[in-house]
Image (tube, rainbow, N blue to C red):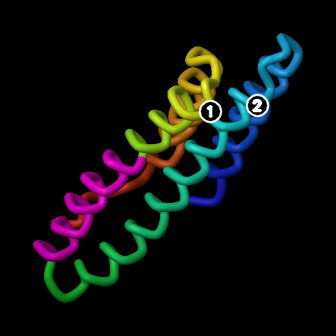
Amino acid sequence: MGKSIQIQGLLGLLMVAVFAWQEQFSAAAFGFLIGVVNVALLGLTFKVANQKAKTDPKSGILVLYLSAVVRFILLAVLFVLGLQLFELAPLPVVLTFVVMQVGQVFNLKGKQRLTD
């Protein structure tokens, strides 16, 4: 997972630099923070799910499903905080987060399902 995290980090930093040039650094940095939180939780979840799947593949899948729900709620809360409470510009927040998630594609190469 190391290479995809590096790619996601570089993509996120690139977006922060682009938006900083347009004087929207804090909004892009918050989008970067949301992306980092998502990547960290996803990495932790995969480790836990892989450990559980060794003894029971269904429990590994359950961990992934529950994590998806938790991450979805957490991301929604973070986006609301950034856009409503901190009144950050939506485009840099969302676009930085989305571009970082594109880097996750590089983590899919060679992966197999937990049930295989």
Q: Is residue 81 left or right of residue 54?
A: right
The residue at the far left in this view is 58
Type of amino acid under label 2: Ser
Residue occupying image coordinates x 38% and y 55% = 111
The residue at the far right in this view is 21
Q: Name the disc covering residue 86, or none.
A: 1
- Numbered range of the magenta stretch: 57-74
Q: Callout 2: 10 Å neighbours few (<14), some, many (20+)?
A: some
- Residues at circles 1 and 2 in contact by the CB criterion of under 8 Å: yes
Type of amino acid under label 1: Phe
Quarter of image, res 14: top right
Question: Does the magenta-highlighted stretch encompass residue 110?
Answer: no
Looking at the rendered structure, the secondary structure element under dot 1 is loop
Q: Main secondary structure of the magenta part?
A: helix
Quarter of image, res 16: top right
Q: Is residue 69 left or right of residue 28?
A: left
Looking at the rendered structure, the secondary structure element under dot 2 is helix
